[in-house]
Image (tube, rainbow, N blue to C red):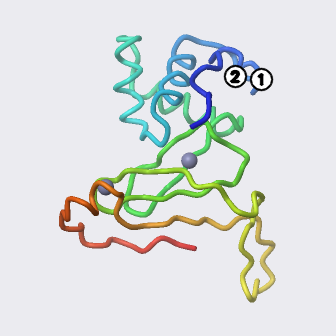
Amino acid sequence: MTDTAAIDAAVRLRASGLRVTDSRRAVVDALGERPHASADELYEIVARSLPGTSLQSVYNALGDFVDAGLARRIEPAGRPGLFELRVDDNHHHLICRSCGAVADVDCVVGHAPCLTPSDTHGFAVDTAEVTFWGLCGACAASGSPTEPAQQEGRA
Ligand SMILES: [Zn+2]
Ligand SMILES: [Zn+2]
């Protein structure tokens, strides 16, 4: 776990060249509190401290964050987009197919792309999305039935 939550949201916003607003600060704080959250989940957190916030303003803030490199959006197959503050280290994710838990796992190489195809077909490859799908420890221990696999993770 990083100390992202401890870093002041306004400092992060300014460092990314973004104007500091109450809703943006609240979204940064929510991301620090709950990494790998969807926009809807972040909205629920933000609405606790800023009841007047709209879901649209949370979406707007997240879009601005991703554009500015402050946040990263991951899009696991069959799931809503998830957001996190941990950027630029090309880390990957473990995702529980049963309960949806997401965990970070360091990229062994560290930079993108960490995998190169045997034949690039002339493409200039700049990233490889690696998602590890399976059951988290709790789900594996409880033996709960796995949801039908929607789509295997790409590697
Ligand atoms: Zn699970
Ligand atoms: Zn992550």
Residue at figure coordinates x 52%, y 21% from the top left: 29
Measuring from the top left, give residue 19's x and y in whole percent.
Answer: 69, 16
97 is higher (above) or lower (below) than 9:
below
Which residue, given by chain and number where applicable, does mark 1 sit on? 15
Q: Is mark 2 within 8 Å of ligand 2?
A: no
Measuring from the top left, give residue 15's x and y in whole percent.
Answer: 77, 23
Secondary element type, mark 1: helix
Identify the image quadrant of the N terminus: top right
| Number of disc labels | 2
The kind of residue on which mark 2 rests is Arg
Residue at figure coordinates x 54%, y 11% from the top left: 22
Q: Nearer the viewer, residue 151 or 110?
A: 110
Q: Is mark 1 within 8 Å of ligand 2?
A: no
Contact check, label 2 and label 1, Cβ < 8 Å: yes
Q: Is residue 125 left or right of residue 141?
A: right
Looking at the rendered structure, which numbered label has been put on residue 30?
none
Inter-mark Cα distance, 2 to 1: 5 Å
Disc 1 packing (10 Å; few <14; some 14–19; many ≥20): few
Disc 2 packing (10 Å; few <14; some 14–19; many ≥20): some
Looking at the rendered structure, which numbered label has been put on residue 12?
2
87 is higher (above) or lower (below) than 34:
below
Identify the image quadrant of the C terminus: bottom right
Residue 49, quarter of the rendered image: top left
Secondary element type, mark 2: helix
Measuring from the top left, give residue 121's x and y in whole percent.
Answer: 76, 86
Measuring from the top left, give residue 73's x and y in whole percent.
Answer: 56, 46
Q: Quadrant of ligand 1?
A: bottom left
Q: Is residue 92 left or right of residue 13?
A: left
27 is higher (above) or lower (below) than 49:
below
Residue 62, quarter of the rendered image: top right
Residue at figure coordinates x 43%, y 39% from the top left: 37
The kind of residue on which mark 1 rests is Ala
